[in-house]
Image: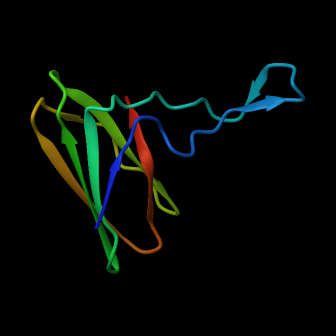
Amino acid sequence: MNTRRVAAVVGASVMVTAGLGIATGTAAQAAVPTCVTTTLNDSGYTDRLTVNNRCGSSQRVKVLLANLTDFACYTIPSGGYRTYSWNYPGRFDGLASC
């Protein structure tokens, strides 16, 4: 089991063209506060992720996956959590605020 603190989105993509400051591609996702933590169990065919909100307020987060469609935005109340699961070939790729 891996425990990860997510302070920023993994894999957010913004390209800067030739140092000119011209952004192309998709816009970067907003960072998630460090009081939102994740616990990932990726030891089997089905991966399970628990997102804990240890912040003093509700947080809207989106679970980003590689090789599968991302989960929709969801509001997690202060002190609450939400569990997600998916099968191979999906892979946890980070969280984004929404």
Residue 97 screen position, x and y as percent: 37, 30
Residue at image position (19%, 43%) is 52
Furthest residue toward left: 79
Residue 71 screen position, x and y as percent: 36, 49
Residue 30 shown left or right of residue 13 in the figure: left
Residue 60 shown left or right of residue 98 in the figure: left
Residue 25 falls in which quadrant of the image?
top right
Residue 56 shown left or right of residue 37 in the figure: left
Above or below residue 20? Residue 40 is: below
Residue at image position (28%, 30%) is 60
The C terminus lies in quadrant: top left
- Please tell me which residue lies in front, 85 or 44: 44
Residue at image position (80%, 19%) is 21
Above or below residue 59? Residue 94 is: below
In the rendered picture of this protein, how many numbered marks are placed on residues?
Answer: 0
Residue at image position (57%, 45%) is 11
Residue 22 falls in which quadrant of the image?
top right
The N terminus lies in quadrant: bottom left
Furthest residue toward right: 18
Residue 56 shown left or right of residue 28 in the figure: left
Q: How is the image coloured?
A: rainbow
Residue 74 screen position, x and y as percent: 25, 38
- Please tell me which residue lies in front, 26 or 32: 32
Residue 82 screen position, x and y as percent: 18, 48
Above or below residue 13? Residue 43 is: below
Above or below residue 87? Residue 24 is: above
